[in-house]
Image: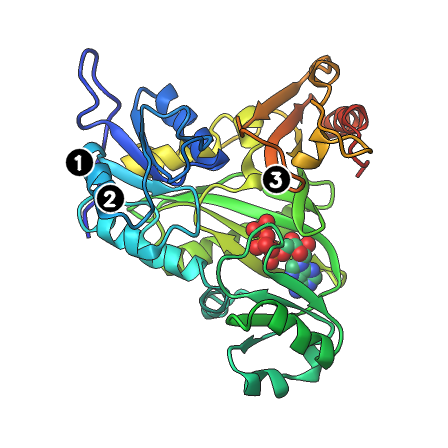
Amino acid sequence: MAQFRTILPAAVGAGAQDSTLGVMGGGQLGRMFVHAAQRLGYFTAVLDPDVASPAGLVSHVHVQTDYLDEQGLAQMLRRCSAITTEFENVPAGALYTLGAHLPTAPGAESVAICQDRKLEKQHFVRCGVPCAPHAVIETAEQLATVDADLLPGILKTTRLGYDGKGQVRVATRDALAAAWSELRQAPCVLEKLLPLDFELSVILARDADGHSVALPVQQNLHRDGVLAVTQVPGPRVTAALAAQATAAAQRIADGLHYVGVLCVEFFVLQDGSLVANEMAPRPHNSGHYSIDACDVSQFDLQVRCMTGLPLPPPRLHSPAVMLNLLGDLWFDDAGRERTPDWTAVLALPGAHLHLYGKSSARRGRKMGHLTLTAATPDAARALALQAAERLGLPAF
Ligand code: ATP
Ligand code: MG
């Protein structure tokens, strides 16, 4: 495995050699990574098969191949000084290949664990962090003998799920069997449906020396399994709860010898207990507010981790509320396409609009986000409610 070293931004007059940062995946997370890297004076290379990927459109170089394409990977190796990922389903094999020659943050082993709900839960347990009671379902026999106490539950594919995709809620054994067929009998985890009070997430950055810093804890609201609203500070997140969640995320990162930005999502149950849901080996939708509300964003931290630059503790300079902008907003009640009323939203003080440059809108597709910052948490929330109303989003 290649060793980490300090990679500095390009010197005045120097070319891209020795100061190009590569990212696997060209979605919105890659785009915001590219923005952060370029602001510091780095060159960037994005590998993504899509000709119009949001990050490919803004990067110095877009390597437009499959993630496992030998020539594509060779090009990344030739051009880049370090590699990161923005997409957790980049085949771990690609990261092993890259990591053999270049510093790769996060490493392939960590990503491989995050890609698999079964391994992920085993890791939580190993680190002494509680997760939902669950059973692995890989065979018809496991399906038939599953503990009735796990029902009602949620059947989730162990791999390739995101934004609630690859998940079915089941109340009975019959429904469970039908759901497993619906998921094409892919390896799954059946999780007990837990009585959630609310949800939060911790985003931390850890360097190759094991030093880590965390963003302030995010309180998250999901609608239909997709993140809708993030509030920081979270109205329900006490200092004690934030410390407990941050310490748990830290144990999870330390246990992986993780290098890079890691997000751990948690449930807070109605009895007040904290349960780890899942983790993502990359910046996370719930950390987007940090671009406008913190003095170091999650994407700045990603750049710093892979280049061996210092990791200062992030400070929240403005209370913030982030609203996700899904493709649904691009359609009116009759299903006709429209453009949301950005002028009305941008008239609000402290409104930071981020659009990802996607070429078409689909219902449920993440098209952008809007962060509202203000002097106090109450003011940020009031602004966000106004913005939601102007966009036709539900109150929260
Ligand atoms: P994403 O990639 O967007 O984070 P995902 O598809 O990986 O989502 P999960 O995080 O597993 O999905 O679940 C999405 C949401 O569904 C959770 O944030 C939570 O609101 C709800 N949920 C998931 N598992 C449970 C559970 N065991 N009990 C109650 N609610 C759950
Ligand atoms: Mg999730």
* The image quarter in which residue 282 lies: top left
The amino acid on which the numbered mark 1 sits, given as a three-letter code, is Arg
**Quarter of the figure that contains the C terminus:** top right
Query: Between 144 and 182, which is closer to the camera in this rendering?
Result: 182
The amino acid on which the numbered mark 2 sits, given as a three-letter code, is Leu
Residue 185 % position (x, y): 55, 73
Left or right: where does residue 113 sit relative to residue 216?
Answer: left
Instruction: State the separation of the CA atoms marked 2 and 1.
Output: 9 Å
Closer to the N terminus: mark 3 or mark 2?
A: 2
Residue at horizontal 50%, vertical 54%?
A: 279
Closer to the N terminus: mark 1 or mark 3?
A: 1
The amino acid on which the numbered mark 3 sits, given as a three-letter code, is Arg
Query: Between 344 and 71, which is closer to the camera in this rendering?
Result: 71
Instruction: State the separation of the CA atoms marked 3 and 2.
Output: 28 Å
Q: Give the residue at mark 3.
A: 365
Residue at horizontal 36%, vertical 45%?
A: 211
The label number, if any, that marks residue 78 in the structure image: 1
**On screen, residue 162 above or below 53:** below
Instruction: State the separation of the CA atoms marked 1 and 3.
Output: 34 Å
Residue at horizontal 77%, vertical 34%?
A: 335
Closer to the N terminus: mark 2 or mark 1?
A: 2
Of discs 1 and 3, which sits in the foreground? 3
Say whether marks 1 and 3 touch (CB < 8 Å). Answer: no
Left or right: where does residue 31 sit relative to residue 361?
Answer: left
Q: Give the residue at mark 2.
A: 73
Residue 347 % position (x, y): 73, 12
Residue 320 % position (x, y): 65, 29
